[in-house]
Image (cartoon, rainbow, N blue to C red):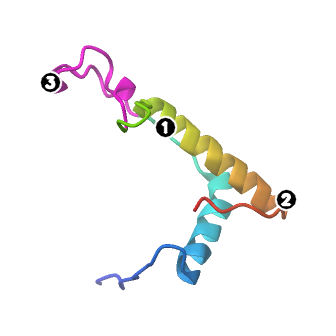
Amino acid sequence: MVPTEEVLSFGDDNVIRFEEVGIKEAQDAAFFLVAGGLGERLGYNGIKVALPAETTTETCFLQLYIESILALQEASSRFSQGLCGFSLL
């Protein structure tokens, strides 16, 4: 069976609805980080998760990963308490 397609536009009602469902379900989520090893093939001398995820602030992948999980945790907590301002958009 082929899944149905869902076309989303940033900020539309469907995005908000799906975001609310995801934030609610995040309470039961687990996050994993697989060991990536060294970045030698990338020309990097350290571990891959220490590589910059973007060039503006040079935030490393691991920091961005952790900050994203913490933001989702906070939004999920606020949502479960019935507080406003749970959107990740």
Q: Residue 8: horizontal and vertical position, in percent? A: 44, 79
CA gap, disc 2 and disc 3:
46 Å
Front-most of residues 74 and 28: 74
**Which stretch appears magenta?**
34-53
- Reading the image, the residue beneath label 2 is 81
Q: Main secondary structure of the magenta part?
A: loop
Residue receiving disc 3: 41
Residue type at the position of mark 3? Arg
Point 59% across, 51% down: residue = 29
Image vertical order of residue 64 relative to residue 18, above or below: above
**Mark 2 Cα shell of 10 Å, populated few (<14), some (14-19), many (≥20):** few
The alpha-carbon separation of the residues under discs 1 and 2 comes to 26 Å
- The residue tagged 1 is 64
Determine crowd level at label 1: few under 14, some 14-19, many 20+ residues with C-alpha closer than 10 A: some
Question: Would you identify the image quadrant in which residue 79 lies?
Answer: bottom right
Residue 58 image position (x, y, % from top left): 40, 30
Earlier in the chain: of badge 1 and badge 3, it is: 3
Quarter-wise, where is residue 41 in the image? Answer: top left
Q: Residue furthest top?
A: 45
49 is within the stretch colored magenta: yes
Residue 20 locus on image (x, y percent): 65, 69
